[in-house]
Amino acid sequence: MAKRGRARKEAKRGLPHFYGRHAVEAALDNPDRDVRKLFLTREAAATLVIPEGMPVQFCEVTDLARHVPKDAPHQGMVAEVAPLEELLLADVLDAGETATLLFLDQVTDPHNVGAIFRSAAAFDAVAVVTQDRHAPPESGVVAKAASGALELVPWIRVVNLSRALIEAAEAGYWRIGLAGESEVLLPDALTPGRNALVLGAEGEGLRHNVGEHCDHLAKLPISERMESLNVSNAAAIALYAAAQR
């Protein structure tokens, strides 16, 4: 298991509140996650395995709404959690000869990031790497969209994405940036060994400097009738392709 680094700073606005059965149960099952308190309806509590000594506040459904975004589907359970401790990129690079890393270049929408984590877990990605200042924090929205995967896939935050790509190359990863203008299809660009997939934000795509730190640019084999895909959908397809190589 990758070693833990220093703890992430707890947000000034308070600790994250994870909501929904998958996110809450996964947080409780993760030995590295510090769950501080549970807010539960009595009906939800009857279906949840609550650790001994865990602080629990029983609430009505309307009271739980104060702990989550408007109209969020909390399913009667909310967990107040501390952010996971930080990992260094070096902690996860030696993950096998056919490992896949996923780099996100300024993907900021928390729903997309959460969905990408879900796909990363489904296709056994080593980690998701983002730039610290251009990615959402751990939050209930990310955790809900990730459906438990936030507890399964390491989230590596780096200061400089290009520098992180250099570090990945030094560890033997073949860096493939997804770019719609490329003439090379992704399956043809993948190596049988270690791959680092690099996806940019919707609209802007990869930044020039990040693209320059990729060994190859490639595109997904989609119909010409569509210019592009949502970044979370593109990530899922790219991860599937990498898993099939």
Image (spheres, rainbow, N blue to C red):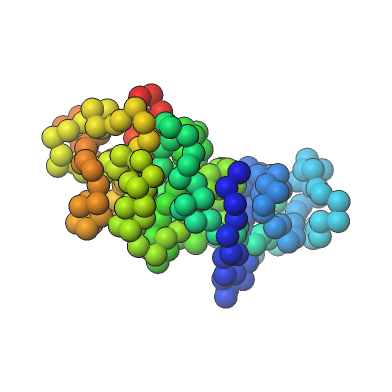
Residue 148 versus residue 69 in the image, above or below: above
Q: State the residue in front, 66 or 24.
A: 24
Residue at left offset 24%, top offset 51%: 213
The residue that appears at 35% across and 37% down in the rendered structure is 195
Q: Quadrant of residue 9?
A: bottom right
Q: On the picture, is 68 further left or further right than 96?
A: right
Horizontal placement of 127 versus 46: left or right?
left
Q: Nearer the viewer, residue 73 or 30?
A: 30
The N terminus, quarter of image: top right
Q: Position of residue 192 (x, y in %)?
A: 34, 27
Which residue of the protein is positioned furthest toward the top in this rendering? 244
Q: Which image quarter holds the C terminus?
A: top left
Write the residue at 47% across / 34% down. 96
Percent of width and height locating residue 143: 55, 51
Q: Residue furthest front?
A: 170
User: In which quarter of the view is residue 55 placed?
Assistant: bottom right
The residue lying toward the viewer, choosing from 219 and 162, is 162
- Can residue 217 be seen in the rendering of this structure? yes
* Residue 223 locus on image (x, y percent): 20, 29
Q: Is residue 20 visible?
A: no
Give how far across and how far down residue 11 sits, in percent: 56, 71
Residue in front for this viewpoint, 112 or 245: 245
Question: Does 238 sit left or right of 151 as displayed?
Answer: left
